Image (cartoon, rainbow, N blue to C red):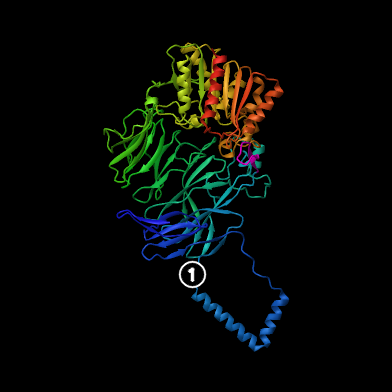
Amino acid sequence: MYLLEVATGKINQITNTIDRESGANFSADERKIIFTSNNNLYSWEIATGAFAQLTDFRRGAKRPDAKISEQEKWLKADQLAYFDVLKERSDKRKASEKNRKADTPSRPKEIYLGDHNISAIQLSPDGNFVTYQLIKSSSAKNTIVPNYVTESGFTEDIPARSKVGGVQSTSELYVYDMKRDTVLLVKTDDLPGIFDTPAYLPANKKDAAKDPKDTKDKKPTPRAVSYSGLVWSADGKNNALSLRSQDNKDRWIVSLDVNTARLKLIDRQHDDAWIGGPGTGGGFFGGASIGWLADNKTLWFQSEESGYSHLYTTDVTTNKKQTLTSGKYEVQSVSLSRDKKFFYIITNEVHPGEKHFYKLPVAGGKAEKLTSMTGAHEVDLSPDEKWIAYRYSYSNKPWELYLQENKAGAKPQQITNSLSAEFKSYNWRDPEVTTFKARDGADVYTRLYKPEKPNGAAVIFVHGAGYLQNAHKWWSSYFREYMFHNLLADKGYTVLDMDYRASAGYGRDWRTGIYRFMGGKDLTDNVDGAKWLAEKHGVDPKRIGVYGGSYGGFITLMGMFTTPDVFAAGAALRPVTDWAQYNHGYTANILNTPALDSVAYAKSSPYYHAAGLKGHLLICHGMVDVNVHFQDAVKLTQRLIELGKDNWELAVYPVEDHGFVEPSSWTDEYKRILKLFENTLK
């Protein structure tokens, strides 16, 4: 560990140990550095160089004191009663032990972890309390992924994840009161809704979800939750943390009284589907965005309660809540200015497919737009906040670095020019970002690639992840697919790339439109897109193909199996074929768990619908895919064989994970996709 004096550039080495040190930060008074090593908290005083161990967490259980029988107790007492020399020696020994303890420096309390792991160890600003979490590891059975092409020449098993529905890890939050030398468990029983069961469960399963062993006399068990770390106000008088139910139906923002370990509610967000959206801390969206204003009593946070992720504040002394942003757009990131008078936010208010940077007074009011170019901006402020640096891109212009003054209307200066002459020699298309109407009247945003010489055929690309955005106006993370779409358009194909139901950027209802039915509205959006191409863009409805990877591969399979008359050909890349085989964190949000919601899994898994295949199908899968396992492709292959289907093929990539890395693999895969469409759609 090192200390850097910024003004002089001088670097001082603080530690030189074998053990790993992490989480270093300054104490509230900036006189010490607090850090973690070997799952314990330490301090280093800057002025004196003095080290102190603040906690004494120990693995395992405390060894019990030796038990003395009643016979032994009587014998000892009898000996001391009748032999003065023994009593004198005993008294001296006790006095010596007392003096030794008096001379021993104060040590932190020994806290035994049992079979738990410890995480999120934090010291309160006043230095009197330590909060920490104990994690009970999951007992769910883990899978393996065989690796066949290895340096050793032997097949090697790669340890992988568990499957959805397995027993999950659980967390407990504790407070160690250093002055009182006591440990308190933080209980969640008083959280509103903590005993609720999911709305989707029929009555006979609600009791089982609470506790399979429930009786009338047994108190119900609160739902398991996960905790964020504490966020303290600058004066150290207030704190906040977010809790999320393990079933991801609730998010609570609370304050913690470290003296009593009691929680006080600041905000609750509930969703019968699942908590999500930027900054909410739901599911796979990262931690919750929360922080304190300059008055040290007003907490800011994001919530999707309006249907879109927006910015709110609450005065924790009065519980007065204020809405700072509103409308049918998302606040996608939030930071506070150095003087805490303004928020800097990135939103898609201008257009769902654009990201712009704004300055917003903390008291609310009109946000000032600081960026101007059409596309997306990923922004960093200079330390003095006079300048902003950002990565900017447009649909057909890859990311470049720009610099501008931190004020509206300032002219951006391009700093980098990264494009090669070869890249610039081709006229990359600027796809039209437009919308079509889905069958339920919803506007579906799309990228449309129009060929100069249409051949009457079309290809629909389905992006992956589900919750991802691709019908936007910035340089796509699917840049290979973007280039492939240019190639297809050169060959006369019309290409459609849409943000179907469940895509990112469009709010809560769009995000949760697939709840309990993947392959429902997300698929019908793609089917409606095919119909729109036929009706509005001169495409032959019998010459439409579909392809995509991961979630896009899944939708491709669902389209080929359940709407076989819509798509003449499909290429499913690294697809999920049975959602019961996938991971818990992603799948349980959307489909719940197989044991409690088997209907959702049966409706949503292509494996069960394979009999519907009519068109030509290509399946491509990496054999060392630790995300969507190759087992999914193998399972579907056997199903297609047993069904007697012969209009499909499987291409395997022995050295590839979920995201290919070898150029030869990418080239082979896209040559096969192109060949499929050329042979079946022309």
Question: Would you place residue 662 above or below residue 675 in this image?
Answer: below
In the displayed structure, would residue 43 be above or below residue 568? Answer: below
Q: Is residue 148 magenta?
A: yes
Label 1 Cα crowd, 10 Å radius (few <14 / some 14-19 / many 20+):
few
Q: Residue at x 40, y 64 (%)?
A: 49
- Which amino acid lies under the numbered mark 1 shown in the image of this protein? Ser
The one nearer the camera, 625 or 661, is: 661
Q: Secondary structure at mark 1?
A: loop
Q: Where's residue 256, x and y in %?
A: 47, 53
Point 62% across, 61% down: residue: 61
> Is residue 284 something that shows in the picture?
yes
- Quarter of the image with the N terminus is bottom left
Up the image or down, 548 lies above or below 155; here it is above
Q: In front: 595, or 481?
A: 481
The reply, left or right, for residue 654 in relation to residue 305 is: right
State the residue lying farthest toward the right: 71
Looking at the image, can residue 325 be seen? no
User: Can you give x and y, in whole percent of width and height, for residue 586 in the image?
Assistant: 56, 37
* Quadrant assignment, res 235: bottom left
Question: Image quarter for residue 161?
Answer: top right
16 or 543, which lies in front?
16
Image position, residue 57 (x, y; %): 54, 60
Q: How many marks?
A: 1
Q: Which residues are magenta?
A: 141-156
The C terminus lies in quadrant: top right
The residue located at (54%, 50%) in the rendering is 188
- Tell whether position 339 is magenta: no
**Residue holding disc 1:** 106
In the rendered image, residue 631, in percent from the top left (x then y), is placed at 64, 33
